[in-house]
Image: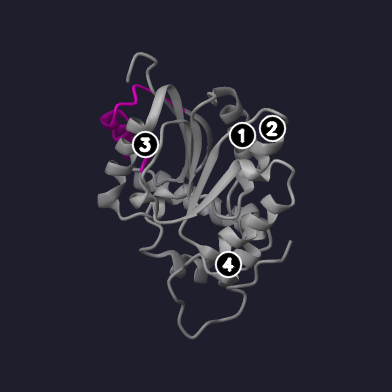
Amino acid sequence: MSQDTIYSKKLPSVPPFEFNENVAGVFNDMIHRSVPLYRETVKRQAQLAARFYTKGTAIIDLGCSNGNFGMRLLNEMGKRPLRMIAVDNSAPMLAIYQKLLDNHPSGNQIELIQANIQDLAMEPASVVILNLTLQFLPIAERDALITRIHQTLTPGGILLITEKVIHEESQLSALQQEFYYRFKGENGYSNLEISQKRDALDNVLVPDSVETHTARFNAAGFTKVDIWQKWFNFTSFICMKDEEES
């Protein structure tokens, strides 16, 4: 695993963050050192996806990056057949993912698509994954995507979504940020790296509050919503579509 040193030296100006070849090359190190409980999140999501997957439907991973969830799911499914569609707009990320699939005996069960997830025509799915992705979309486009996901899901299907969130109360928001930066420091990031990464993500990653997410899920038609994991300003939701819905 290549180490993330992208922001280790003082940059004359910090460009906006993007999932380019440099980021793709160090992504696993970056995400494990930057996202609390990431390994646990992906492990449990794979288990949930395997539990709720229905034959004849798809599992759709929107913003799949380099395939950490997909590869975990293949191992979780074992010999059970599945159809999975993994979508990302980053060619370098998908190139890494494809190499992993090429070396996995069940890799042909996952189809990779390079596209903006807002433009994807989604087929019926029993599971949709949206990990640390909605936060990168323009705010005005988020409601419509969640509504389309609800429409795409078959009755009893689930949306699994993890997001960085912001607290609506300013003191608690500041506390969450403080402990998040402490987490990154404990994982070896310097103050300079933390500061420059924050500048790179400014106006690129725009988090919502838990309340905003919940209201969005409800408005889309999800009446069963639960937070199954939370670490300060990182939250994992499960949203279930009613079995009676068409």
The numbered mark, 4 or 1, whose residue comes first in the sequence reads 4
Residue 13, percent across and down? 45, 82
Sort mark 4 into few (<14), some (14-19) or many (20+) by Cα contacts within 10 Å: some
Q: Residues within 10 Å of mark 2 (few under 14, many from 20)?
A: some
Name the secondary structure under disc 3: helix
Looking at numbered disc 4 in the image, what kind of residue is underneath it?
Answer: Val
- Res 243 quadrant in image: top left
Q: Is residue 26 above or below residue 61?
A: below
Real-space CA distance between mark 4 and mark 3, rounded to the nearest whole angstrom = 28 Å
Helix, strand or loop at disc 1? helix
Distance from the alpha carbon under mark 3 to that under mark 1: 18 Å
Mark found first going from the N terminus, 2 or 3: 2
According to the picture, the residue beneath numbered tag 2 turns out to be: 76
Structural crowding at the residue carrying mark 3, measured as other residues with C-alpha within 10 Å and reported as few (<14), some (14–19) or many (≥20): many
Drawn side of residue 128 relative to residue 73, left or right: left
31 vs 211, left or right, is right
The relative height of residue 91 versus residue 104 in the rendered view (above or below) is below
The amino acid type of the residue labelled 2 equals Glu
Q: Counting residues from the N terminus, which is met first, the one under dot 2 or under dot 1?
A: 1
Q: Which mark is residue 23?
A: 4
Question: Label 2, label 1: how many angstroms apart (C-alpha)?
Answer: 7 Å
| Residue occupied by mark 3 | 149
Element type where label 4 sits in the image: helix
The location of residue 23, given as percent across then percent down, is 58, 67
Quarter containing the N terminus: bottom right
Q: Which residue is rendered at x = 57% and y = 60% of the image?
A: 93
Name the residue rendered at 42%, 44% in the picture: 172
Mark closest to the chain's N terminus, 3 or 1: 1
Q: Quadrant of the C terminus?
A: top left
Helix, strand or loop status at disc 2: helix
The circle on residue 46 is 1
